[in-house]
Image (tube, grey):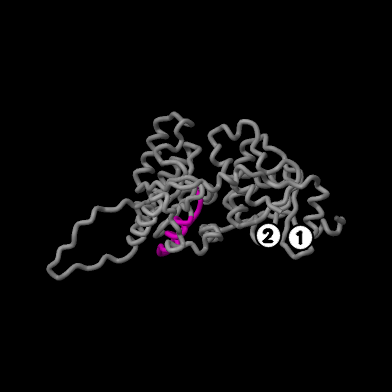
Amino acid sequence: MTEERQAVVPRLTERTPAMSAAELAKTLVPPRQFDGATFESYRPDRDYPSQGEALAKIRAFAEGWKPAKAGGFFGRGKKIPAAKPGIYLDGGFGVGKTHLLAALWHAAPGPKYFGTFIEYTALIGALGYAGAVQLFTGAAFVAIDEFELDDPGDTMLMTRFLGELVAKGTRLAATSNTPPNALGEGRFAASDFLREIQAIADRFEILRIDGLDYRRRDIEGHAVAFGSDAELAVAVEQRAEAGERITSDDFGALVQHLGSIHPSRYVRLVEDVDVIALRDVAPFANQTDALRFVAFVDRVYDAQVRILASGTPLDEVFAGDMMNGGYRKKYLRAVSRLIASATL
């Protein structure tokens, strides 16, 4: 690749996105692969009855937005027990939890929001607690995907935040791979933390969805990596000439750049990009950098951006004891998404 060609290929490290509260709110929608998710397009597996049962309960939850039918002149309607303000889908990877959550979001009236747990905590960090509460006040529905709690501080923050929204009439739905009362189990022993977990769990009707763990098959694969920077450079040039919107960065420089941008703005960092090229990928030595990269990978995956890389295969960047610590679930999800994204 010539120096002239290198000069016209943009870098992510040249982007320093700034977003207002209103712009951040507009990003809280389902990932593009769930743009058309509906209850009708969800196909329960007959071998796992819990999938059909969850679909029925999600439909019933959606009925709560419809006006109540008036009874007869002399009739007295049956007293229906007050429904919980939230519904919680628990199950393994690939059983359709996010599809159902997105379908519920599409069926809900506005204002409504859809984001991951990480996105909400990042947004609260960017706007401040009072600013976030003000932004979400009046929301009819808030959907929370990948409801993970790896930090007691985030737990208390989200418990308080969701409590305020529910008090103002907002309904909630969430997904996770672990029942709410088991989140944090084996990682934190503080009784206050466990008490906060239970406070969150009490807000939701908990639904278990069983099924095949499709994403585990991806985890057993490997991310494709170019044998050298020169080979990667040729691929970058070919894709740029073909009209693909491609960026090219040194992996270390990008990781450093991510530390200068609030994670809530990563969505704008990968906006209007088809392919990301990363040179000299290397394992993480710093967990803070690794967690920032996890948040970045989520945005890349949601935007369906492909990754080309040289150096260490991307599924091997979470090295050492990282995969055995409290953030194991986050890293496993990122590995799955990196394998899916790092294809030629």
| Quadrant location of the C terminus in the rendered image | bottom right
Percent coordinates x, y for residue 117 in the rendering: 49, 47
How many C-alpha atoms fall within 10 Å of the one at disc 2: few (<14), some, or many (≥20)?
A: some
On the image, which quarter does residue 189 sit in?
A: top left
The secondary structure type at the circle numbered 2 is loop
Residue 324 higher or lower than 292, as above or below: above
- Label 1 crowding class (10 Å Cα cut-off): few <14, some 14-19, many 20+? some
Residue 274: which numbered mark, if any?
A: 2
Is residue 85 within the magenta segment? no
Start-end of magenta stretch: 99-117
| Amino acid under disc 2 | Asp
- Is residue 48 or residue 236 the one in the foreground? 48
According to the image, label 1 marks what residue? 239
Quadrant where the N terminus is found in the figure: bottom right
x and y percentages locating residue 19 in the rendered image: 59, 57
Residue 318 as seen in the image, left or right of residue 144: right
Q: Going 45% across and 60% down the picture, which residue do you hit?
A: 103
In the rendering, at what x and y percent does residue 226 appear?
76, 47
Left or right placement of residue 289 versus residue 2 in this view:
left
Judged from this view, the residue extending furthest toward the bottom is 73
Count of numbered labels shown in the rendering: 2
Taking depth in this image into account, of 327 and 157 the one nearest to the observer is: 327
* Amino acid on which disc 1 is placed: Arg
Q: CA distance from mark 2 to mark 1?
A: 10 Å
The residue drawn where x is 40% and y is 46% is 208
